[in-house]
Image: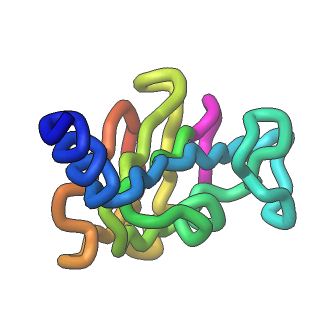
Amino acid sequence: MQFIRTIIMSLALLPLATFATTYYANGSTGSDSNSGTASGSPKKTIQAAINAAQNGDTVSVAEGTYKENLNLAKRISLIAASPLKVTINGNQSGHCIKITTGAAGCVVDGFVLYKG
C-alpha cells in the first residue's frame, strides 16, 4: 500500500506535459490573419508562422518560392514540407535566414536558399 501511495505522489509531482504545436505556411493559399495551426488555414508568410510559434514548436512550409528575409530567434523546427521544393529567395536584400542566439537548438531542414 505504501508503494502505491509513493507512486501516486511521484506522479502528482511530475510537471505538466507541454505539447508542441505545428504551424503551417503556404504562400499560395495562406493568409497571415489565419491561425496557421491547421494545414487548411495556413499563414501566407513563413515569418508570420515563425512569429506565432513558441519554443519547441514546428513550422511546416508548403512547396513554393518565398521572397522573405527571415529572422529566427526561437528554438523551433523550420521544416520544408517537400524537401528541396521550398525556396527562400532573399531578393538580394540581406540574409535568407538570420538565426540569433535565442534560437540555439533550432532545426532548419529541406530549404533551398537563394539570393541571400
Q: Nearer the viewer, residue 104 or 82?
A: 104
Q: Is residue 37 above or below residue 70?
A: above
Q: What's the residue at 18%, 65% (across, down)?
A: 104
Q: Looking at the image, is 114 positioned above or below residue 39?
A: below
Residue at 56% x, 71% y is: 51
Answer whether residue 2 is visible to the viewer in this image.
yes
Q: How is the image coloured?
A: rainbow
Quadrant location of residue 65?
Answer: top right
Query: In the figure, is residue 12 to the left or right of 45?
Result: left
Give the answer, above or below, for where 66 lies relative to 102: above
Point 43% across, 23% down: residue = 83
| In the image, farthest residue toward the front | 1
Q: Specify the principal SS of the magenta part.
A: strand
Q: Quadrant of the N terminus?
A: top left
Where does the image place residue 80, in percent across and percent down from the top left? 47, 34
Q: Quadrant of residue 72?
A: bottom left
Please check the rendered image and state whether residue 64 is part of the magenta-colored stretch, yes or no: yes
Q: Is residue 116 visible?
A: no
Whether residue 68 sits left or right of residue 70 in the image: it is right
- The quadrant the C terminus occupies is bottom left
Going by the image, does 34 lie left or right of 81?
right
Q: Position of residue 4 (x, y in %)?
A: 23, 35
**Magenta residue span:** 61-66
Indicate the quadrant where residue 13 lies.
bottom left
The answer to if 33 sits in the magenta stretch is: no
Could you tell me how many numbered marks the image carries? 0
Tell me which residue sits at (46%, 74%) in the image: 93
**Front position in the image: 110 or 24:** 24
43 relative to 78 in the view: left or right? right
